[in-house]
Image (tube, rainbow, N blue to C red):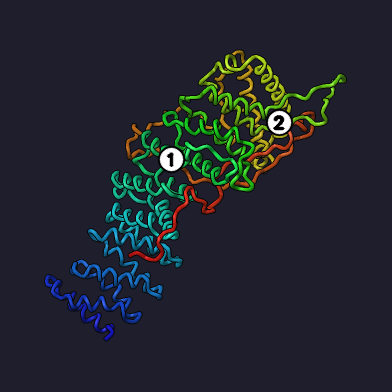
């Protein structure tokens, strides 16, 4: 015989009045459990009554949890929401892992209100037992369905940072890092970015040693032991993703040496044959920008001379010789070489940074003929620069405020930064012997204010694990479409060609390409 509303209220009354003798009324609690087999009204009452007396009947714990789970899967969304709302009341002792595991699986719902209810329930049990809750979440990330895994990772990436320090203790953060490393053994590109966001925000990893551990995690993902296949867009995608995640971690104490070495030995020689993972991405410029940003943090390099030579050779490719002149003083060719300023800024900056480590490279390691050839190229490039810089200054003269905010003028401002940077570095290389003392800010990077530069940045050790100054991986901005600027006409206009400025931003994708090939997982709920 089906349980009725009256049965539920009568047995609820028995249990409520029993007080210290509550455990003697097992039959009354069983009637309430049976309420999940009734109609909609009976189910709503059962969803509230079952958790209220749950702790008094440990021998019926499994039956009670299973009954509540039946309600969490009911066809009536209002019953599901009520059952989910009450689930945290079952999260006691050894049950915390199971409840967290169940709630994680329930993240797959497509009902917005129900999804928010699951999120709220998960956050509430976090405050009861963070480590136990994380155990349930990571269990589903490692073994659950793809949709559950995806949403669990997104939950961690958005919610962990909102939890207070007394919940996210050092022990809990260390557990997050350890479990994340297990997940990292088999991830997609999108999952990798989200998980790096999770671990980079952990206070326990804000020290120099912590950031070094994060770099090691990225190095493992980047697979720097393997040669790069430039024709494989997945391999190129992996390298780009990993380098972007590592970049904010580098500092004078956390070196970029392995990445810079890999770029010199495996990427630069294949630069022209790299296959872009995104159609509109200028892959060569993107790679050169990453190399330039990493180069100031390069430590002692095992094959410094050989890698400098690779960089030097690649720089020469983008610095053309002046066209030959015939007897009347005119060019023998109808078209002057194009000067690719954006590429040269990256290459000459990287060469300048690594050159500091071997300042006699151009004097002792490059023969006289090649050095002469290099200086001819530098001189020709510098002449083109001077013309272009003058044209840009004239175009921008007197413009302030809103006038500088037009798309064309913003591109001109960046073009002026690029050409000025190259000009400064060329002057250094023209010194005899070459100098490596000048400093420039890469054109796409924000200029640091003098007071910010002068201020001493406290190290992780000085701050302690609870320090407020963090070097975190910021969410990557959307890539804007490339903007093309045609310089004014003049003697060097043909050699300058179209100036292309592309802001470096986040990798736009979500294609589900794997850094590994995640195997198929079991389907169906595993409560």
Q: Would you identify the image quadrant in which residue 465 lies?
A: top left
The spot of residue 142 in percent (x, y) is 38, 54
Secondary structure of the residue carrying numbered label 2: loop
Asked whether residue 446 appears in the rendered view, the answer is no
Above or below: residue 23 compared with residue 509: below
- Identify the residue under disc 1: 220
Q: Which mark is residue 339?
A: 2
Q: Residues within 10 Å of mark 1 (few under 14, many from 20)?
A: few
* Residue positioned 59% across, 27% down in the render: 311
Which quadrant of the rendered structure holds the C terminus?
bottom left
Q: Which mark is residue 405?
A: none
Quick check: 140 left or right of 7?
right
Looking at the image, is mark 2 or mark 1 nearer the viewer? 1
Above or below: residue 39 compared with residue 437: below
The spot of residue 514 in percent (x, y) is 49, 50
What number of labels is visible? 2
Quick check: 500 left or right of 102?
right
Quick check: 45 left or right of 57?
right
């Amino acid at each position: 015989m089906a349980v009725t509303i009256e049965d539920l209220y009568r047995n609820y009354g028995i249990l409520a009045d029993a007080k210290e003798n509550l455990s003697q009324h097992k039959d009354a609690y069983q009637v309430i459990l049976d309420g999940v087999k009734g109609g909609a009204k009976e189910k709503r009452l059962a969803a509230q009554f079952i958790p209220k007396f749950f702790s008094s009947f440990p021998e019926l714990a499994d039956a009670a949890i299973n009954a509540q789970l039946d309600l969490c899967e009911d066809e009536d969304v209002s019953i599901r929401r009520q059952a989910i709302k009450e689930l945290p009341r079952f999260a006691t002792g050894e049950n915390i892992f199971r409840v967290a595991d169940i709630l994680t699986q329930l993240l797959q719902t497509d009902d917005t209100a129900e999804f928010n209810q699951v999120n709220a329930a998960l956050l509430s049990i976090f405050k009861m037992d963070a480590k136990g809750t994380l155990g349930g979440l990571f269990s589903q990330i490692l073994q659950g369905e793809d949709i559950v895994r995806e949403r669990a990772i997104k939950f961690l990436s958005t919610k962990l940072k909102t939890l207070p320090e007394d919940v996210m203790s050092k022990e809990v953060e260390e557990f997050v890092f350890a479990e994340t490393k297990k997940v990292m053994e088999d991830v997609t590109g999108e999952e990798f970015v989200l998980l790096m966001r999770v671990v980079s925000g952990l206070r326990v990893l804000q020290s120099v040693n912590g950031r070094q551990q994060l770099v090691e995690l990225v190095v493992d993902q980047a697979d720097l032991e393997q040669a790069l296949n430039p024709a494989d867009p997945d391999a190129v995608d992996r390298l780009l993703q990993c380098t972007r995640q590592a970049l904010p971690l580098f500092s004078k104490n956390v070196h970029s040496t392995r990445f810079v070495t890999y770029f010199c030995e495996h990427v630069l020689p294949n630069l022209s044959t790299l296959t872009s993972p995104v159609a509109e991405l200028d892959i060569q410029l993107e790679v050169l920008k990453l190399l330039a940003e990493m180069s100031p943090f390069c430590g002692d390099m095992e094959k410094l001379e050989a890698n400098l030579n690779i960089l030097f050779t690649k720089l020469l490719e983008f610095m053309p010789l002046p066209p030959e002149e015939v007897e009347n003083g005119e060019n023998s060719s109808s078209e002057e070489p194009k000067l690719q300023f954006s590429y040269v800024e990256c290459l000459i900056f990287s060469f300048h940074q690594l050159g500091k480590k071997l300042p006699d490279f151009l004097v002792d390691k490059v023969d006289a003929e090649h050095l002469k050839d290099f200086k001819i190229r530098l001189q020709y490039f510098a002449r083109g620069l001077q013309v272009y810089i003058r044209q840009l200054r004239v175009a921008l003269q007197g413009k302030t405020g809103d006038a500088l905010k037009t798309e064309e003028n913003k591109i001109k401002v960046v073009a002026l930064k690029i050409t000025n940077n190259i000009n400064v570095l060329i002057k250094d290389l023209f010194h005899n012997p070459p100098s490596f003392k000048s400093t420039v800010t890469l054109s796409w990077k924000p200029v640091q204010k003098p007071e910010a530069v002068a201020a001493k940045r406290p190290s992780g050790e000085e701050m302690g694990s609870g320090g407020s100054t963090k070097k975190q991986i910021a969410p990557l901005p959307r890539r804007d479409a490339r903007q093309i600027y045609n310089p004014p006409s003049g003697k060097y206009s043909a050699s300058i060609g179209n100036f292309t400025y592309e802001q470096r931003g986040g990798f736009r994708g979500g294609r589900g390409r794997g850094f590994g090939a995640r195997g198929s997982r079991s389907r169906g709920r595993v409560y």
